[in-house]
Image (cartoon, rainbow, N blue to C red):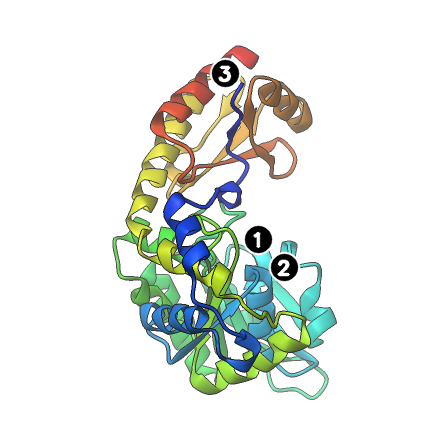
C-alpha cells in the first residue's frame, strides 16, 4: 500500500530533471569560491530576492542563525513571533551561537501583534538588553502556513527603520507566500535587510537553503558558515537541483489548491474540525475532537496516510509536489474509513 505522506513538504523526492542536473553538474571547491554551479545559484537567488548577494547553506536553520550572528552582538535582543520557527525549532541556537535573547510577541503577524510590537522595543537603558533585530516568518509554519500581508510587513519595516533596527525574514516558504498574495517575491524580500528561503521544501530540491542580503552581510555570513561547519566542497552537485527548483515555482499553486481540497474534505469527516478561512497556502491544521493526537495519527497511518502532530488536539497536513489531487481524494477516503 502506498503511503500518502502529508507530514511536511520536506519529504519530496528530487525530480528526474533535478537528478539529471545533479549528475551533469559542473563543480569545483566552494570553500575557495570555485564551484561554478553554486556561484550561479547564489547569483540567481540574489537577483530573485532583489539583494546584492546570496549564500548557499545546508539548512534553513543555519541560514537563520547566520543572520542572527551577523546582525547582532552578544547580549542583544531579537523580537520574533511567539510561534516563530527560530523560537520553537532551532534548539535555542540564538543563545548558544550568537549570545542573544529572543523576545517573542504573541500574534506578531497580525494587527493585534503589530499594536504591541513597539512595546517590545527596549528603551536605551543601561540595565536592559538592547533590541537589535526583528525576525519575521512568512509563511508562518505554526500558524498553519498563514501569510503576513505586505501592508503589515511594511509597517514592521518602517518601525524598524525609525528605531534603527534590522529586519530578517525567515522566508523558508516565501514563494508560497508570494503565490498566495499574487505578488512578486521581491515585494516581500524588500521589507527585510536579509532573507532566508528553502530550496528543500515546496520547491522540491533535496538539500539546501539560501541566505541573501548586502555584500558585506553575506561576506561575514560566509565566514560564519565555515565556523559552523557549513563550508561544503563540490557542492554544485546539490546546487544544481536548486537551480532546477527555482525554474519550477509555478507548481506551488497546485499545492495550494490541493490544500483547500484536503481541508474541505477533512471538514466533512466526523470528529475533525478545520477552519477553512486559515487555509492560505499548502498547510491544513485539523483539530481532533474525540481521539488523542497519537491515536489519530496511528489510525490514519495504518490506513496509509501520514500527518504530523502540532500540539494538543492538533494535527498538520502539508501538501507538496509529490501529492496529486487524486492522492488527496484517496487520503480523504482512507482517513474517513480509519475513523
Residue drawn at 62 percent across, 78 percent down: 224
How packed is label 3: few (under 14 Cα within 10 Å), some, or many (20 or more)?
A: some
Q: Nearer the viewer, residue 146 or 186?
A: 186
Q: Which residue is mark 3?
A: 334
Vertical placement of residue 198 versus 166, above or below: above
Position in image of residue 242 (x %, y %): 42, 58
In whole angstroms, how far apart are the C-alphas of marks 2 and 3? 35 Å
Vertical placement of residue 275 versus 91, above or below: above
Position in image of residue 268 (x %, y %): 42, 18
CB under 8 Å between discs 2 and 1: yes
Left or right of 329? Residue 289 is right
Q: Nearer the viewer, residue 65 or 202?
A: 202
Q: Which residue is mark 2?
A: 87
The part of the image, by quadrant, that contains residue 31 is bottom right
Q: Secondary structure at mark 3?
A: helix
Query: Taking the image as drawn, is residue 203 in sight?
Result: no
Q: Secondary structure at mark 1?
A: loop
Q: Which residue is mark 1?
A: 83
In whole angstroms, how far apart are the C-alphas of marks 1 and 3? 31 Å
Q: Earlier in the sequence, mark 2 or mark 3?
A: 2
Amino acid at each position: 500500500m502506498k503511503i500518502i505522506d502529508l507530514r511536511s513538504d520536506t519529504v519530496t523526492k528530487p525530480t528526474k530533471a533535478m537528478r539529471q542536473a545533479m549528475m551533469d553538474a559542473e563543480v569545483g571547491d566552494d570553500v575557495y569560491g570555485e564551484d561554478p554551479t553554486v556561484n550561479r545559484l547564489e547569483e540567481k537567488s540574489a537577483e530573485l530576492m532583489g539583494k546584492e548577494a546570496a549564500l548557499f547553506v545546508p539548512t534553513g536553520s543555519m541560514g537563520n542563525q547566520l543572520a542572527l550572528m551577523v546582525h547582532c552582538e552578544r547580549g542583544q535582543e531579537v523580537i520574533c513571533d511567539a510561534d516563530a520557527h527560530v523560537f520553537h525549532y532551532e534548539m535555542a541556537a540564538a543563545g548558544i551561537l550568537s549570545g542573544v535573547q529572543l523576545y517573542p510577541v504573541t500574534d506578531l503577524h497580525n494587527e493585534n501583534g503589530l499594536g504591541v510590537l513597539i512595546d517590545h522595543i527596549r528603551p536605551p537603558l543601561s540595565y536592559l538588553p538592547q533590541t537589535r533585530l526583528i525576525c519575521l516568518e512568512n509563511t508562518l509554519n505554526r500558524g498553519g502556513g498563514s501569510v503576513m500581508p505586505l501592508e503589515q510587513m511594511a509597517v514592521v519595516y518602517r518601525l524598524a527603520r525609525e528605531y534603527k533596527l534590522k529586519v530578517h525574514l525567515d522566508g523558508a516558504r516565501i514563494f508560497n507566500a508570494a503565490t498566495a498574495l499574487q505578488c512578486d517575491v521581491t515585494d516581500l524580500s524588500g521589507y527585510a535587510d536579509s532573507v532566508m528561503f528553502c530550496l528543500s521544501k515546496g520547491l522540491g530540491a533535496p538539500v539546501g537553503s539560501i541566505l541573501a542580503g548586502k555584500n558585506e552581510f553575506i561576506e561575514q555570513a560566509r565566514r560564519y558558515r565555515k565556523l559552523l561547519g557549513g563550508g561544503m566542497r563540490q557542492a554544485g552537485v546539490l546546487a544544481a537541483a536548486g537551480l532546477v527548483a527555482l525554474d519550477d515555482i509555478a507548481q506551488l499553486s497546485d499545492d495550494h489548491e490541493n490544500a483547500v481540497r484536503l481541508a474541505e474534505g477533512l471538514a466533512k469527516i466526523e470528529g475533525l474540525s478545520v477552519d477553512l478561512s486559515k487555509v492560505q497556502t499548502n498547510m491544513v491544521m485539523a483539530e481532533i475532537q474525540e481521539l488523542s493526537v497519537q491515536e489519530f495519527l496511528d489510525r490514519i497511518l495504518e490506513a496509509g496516510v501520514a500527518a504530523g502532530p502540532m500540539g494538543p488536539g492538533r494535527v498538520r497536513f502539508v501538501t507538496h509536489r509529490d501529492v496529486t489531487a487524486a492522492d488527496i481524494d484517496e487520503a480523504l477516503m482512507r482517513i474517513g474509513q480509519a475513523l
